[in-house]
Amino acid sequence: MQMDNQLAFFSHVVSNDFAILVALLNKKKNGEDKKESNLLTSRNYKCYAPDHHQYAEEIALECVRQSGFANYEEMLKHIAKILNVTGETIEEIEHNIIFAIMALPTQNYTQEDFIRLAIELRLDPTEYSFLGIKNALLEKFKKNEMLPFYQIAMLINAMVLRYFEENPCQDSALYSSSLIELRSVEKFANFNLFKQSNFAEFSEKEIFCTALVLAIIALHKKDIVFYGRSGDSKAELIRKLKRFTVLLNTVPQFTKSSNIDVIQAIYAFSVVYLGRYQMPMPRKMACEMLFATQFEKFSDQEQNALVEAEKTTENLENLTKKLLANGVTKDQMQDLIGVLALSKNKLIKIENIFIEWSVKLGLR
């Protein structure tokens, strides 16, 4: 059997990222080994596992062999057909499958859930709904801003793991950290995709192939992000994402417990800071990111203060002095700058900007 050109990108994938796909190929739903898996008897697998990158070509061949299709494209199109989605290209079909699957766990989302998901994907949708998220993702893709698809890959893989009765990757530090990296992933990880009514008439082979396709799509999205169009290395992207995730938790801890003057000054600081880089942030998104609170949940007095803060004419230096005088520490100010610097996923030298303003404002 020849290597499938559509899966040639497997040669780029690092070993840890293959874990879910290898589990699908080697394990039954109940966790028992598959006797029919050629990987389990492969010399390379026996010698190098779990360093899966060493036998990436064998993994690609096994995906096609176990699917029963001639190649990945045939398998993808079959799954697309039974999910009732179409597309002109492989990439378009993959995107439409992603959206068809993602629509299921989000069908009962509140607007607040969509706001949180938008922030975690670093999107500015025109509306906080599934359609708004979908359109914003496609817009990012057109602009070659690929990092949101890294998070999407995590969400997809979280759902694929529900294929098994018990998560075969549960003991992996990589997946333990990935599943708590974004607040929304937990909802996807607990969503039993393969027991939904949409899959009621699927054969066991079709359910397996669906899981296989989703795991491959997740790898494909990561490959594009880390080796294709992002401009950053994989390590750099993960570092930025994890830093942003930590700051999303730490910044609201001191901002939402502040008095109205501090809330207003923090919001004004964000408006001025992001304005310097032509990166305005929608009010709802800014409130959730900075205060972990929706704008509508602020009191009338606080809402008026935030609206006034958007009109500020003060500079960053004066706003910094005001915040420090009101009890915000230098470390907290640096956290605030950090979350703002990382918030829009623009391909700019984020660390340089962060350090530059920390020094300028006397925080370092």
Image (spheres, rainbow, N blue to C red):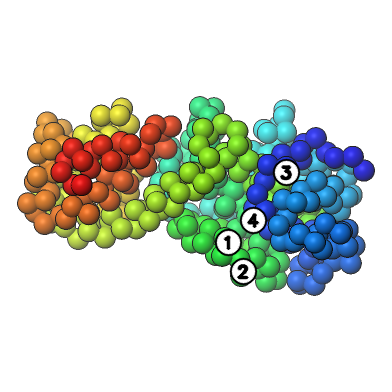
User: Where is residue 168 drawn, in percent x and y?
Assistant: 68, 68
Q: Earlier in the sequence, mark 2 or mark 1?
A: 2
Kind of residue sitting beneath label 2: Gln
Q: Earlier in the sequence, mark 1 or mark 4?
A: 4
User: Where is residue 86 drawn, in percent x and y?
Assistant: 72, 35
User: Where is residue 352 drawn, in percent x and y?
Assistant: 33, 36
Q: Are marks 2 and 1 in contact (CB under 8 Å)?
A: yes
Q: Are marks 3 and 1 in contact (CB under 8 Å)?
A: no
User: Where is residue 323 drawn, in percent x and y?
Assistant: 12, 49
Kind of residue sitting beneath label 1: Tyr
Cα gap from disc 4 to disc 2, whole angstroms: 13 Å
Cα gap from disc 2 to disc 3, whole angstroms: 23 Å
Q: Nearer the viewer, mark 2 or mark 3?
A: 3
Q: Earlier in the sequence, mark 4 or mark 2?
A: 4
Q: Which residue is mark 2?
A: 170
Q: Is residue 361 visible?
A: yes
Kind of residue sitting beneath label 3: Phe
Task: Decide if residue 291 is on the left or right side of residue 261.
Answer: right
Who's the residue at 79% across and 67% down the image?
A: 28
With respect to residue 96, does 247 lie above or below?
Answer: below
Q: Earlier in the sequence, mark 4 or mark 3?
A: 3
Cα gap from disc 1 to disc 4, whole angstroms: 9 Å
The N terminus is located in which quarter? Answer: top right
Q: Secondary structure at mark 2?
A: loop
Who's the residue at 76% across and 72% down the image?
A: 30
